[in-house]
Image (spheres, grey):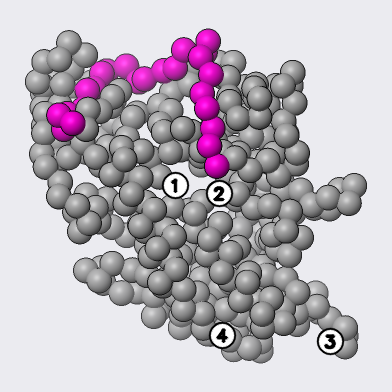
Amino acid sequence: MAKDAKTVFVGLSGGVDSSVAAGLLKDAGYKVEGVFIKVWRPPFLKCSWSDDRLDAMRVCAHLEIPFRDLDLSGEYKSEVVDYMVSEYKRGRTPNPDVMCNKHIKFGKFLDYAKREGAEYVATGHYARVEKRGGEFILKKGKDENKDQSYFLWTLGKDELENVWFPIGDYKKSETRKLAEKFGLPTASKKESQGLCFLGEIDLKEFLGEFMELKSGDVLDEDGNKIGAHDGAIIYTVGQRHGFRVKSEKGSPHYVISRDMSKNTITVSTKPPTLDIKDSYKLEDINWISGNPKEDYTYFARIRHQGSLIPCNIIDSNKVKFLSKVDSLAAGQSLVLYVNELCIGGGVIE
């Protein structure tokens, strides 16, 4: 290793992606240290973080790099979990992965790394950071099916200049092959949830620990009762499961609106669409590559791996869609793209 090798702290989740990120950096000659971030988990959920931590330790031992623990459970509870519960209480659709990246991985973890003498942090995200014309830009990952740039729109230039995504130039299949090449103990491990435990738990069960959920009526478009639900607060516009309706045709039903005061949801056999004449305001905006041009057609995503929707940006804080959009909800992240470049985004007000 060169004496002037840069120090990189790699956030290890115990999964294959972050393990390969560490392997690539070690192979390239950097001074690499693995950091396992402990986050808050519901006390009623069977704890599995210790298994992930053990896998992260095994990876570090195999790569012969130092291992560190970083307990951010309190920060995760306040910045991610409390935010999520608050958004649901307001009848909005939260995006905890975005907040986790903003406040935990590229907030507290990055701050910790700098304090401990690291020049950079790296993670196993499928995204790319490049320097173009003296500015750092965010791009989609090479693997379109795994691209995670949607969750990274809150990162600013201060974060991007200190963040590396080593596997962003690889497809998932290639990442697996690299894990085997490096002989990593996580090479055959199934897909990891990373810091987010929500994939392991029913939303109703989770929210029920923080608020009282009351069953209510499911209405059709004419206001007739056709079924029941478990609490209007847990549903989002466009959702097509999790409630009970009587239907002779057996067609799927979509949530088209909610009335929190009456605890009812209204459903239809047709998915909700927006009038393309309308514009929608954005809040908590972060334009990574400068304010968007008003006379330019961008492409927006309103959910991870969702369709790219042509749109215009007005006054830097409003979006006008140029084609019909299904299931837009307040609280969702809207992220703009030009080809592979992620421009930034905002939250639907």
Task: Tell whether label 1 touches label 2 (CB within 8 Å).
Answer: yes
Q: Secondary structure at mark 3?
A: loop
Q: Secondary structure at mark 4?
A: strand
Badge 3, how many Cα within 10 Å: few under 14, some, many 20+? few
Task: Tell me residue 230's x, y (percent).
Answer: 15, 40
Which residue is at a point 84% across and 81% down the rendered structure image? 5
Task: Tell whether label 4 touches label 1 (CB within 8 Å).
Answer: no
Q: Quick check: can you spot residue 32?
A: no
Find disc 4 in the rendering and name its residue: 68
- Alpha carbon separation for disc pair 2 and 1: 9 Å
- Alpha carbon separation for disc pair 1 and 4: 28 Å
Left or right: where does residue 143 sit relative to residue 158? left
Find disc 2 in the rendering and name its residue: 151
Q: Which mark is residue 1?
A: 3
The image shows residue 328, relative to residue 192, as above or below, that is: above
Give the amino acid type for the residue marked by disc 1 in the picture: Asn
Find disc 1 in the rendering and name its residue: 95
Quadrant of res 94: top left
Q: Quick check: can you spot residue 41?
A: yes
Give the amino acid type for the residue marked by disc 4 in the picture: Arg
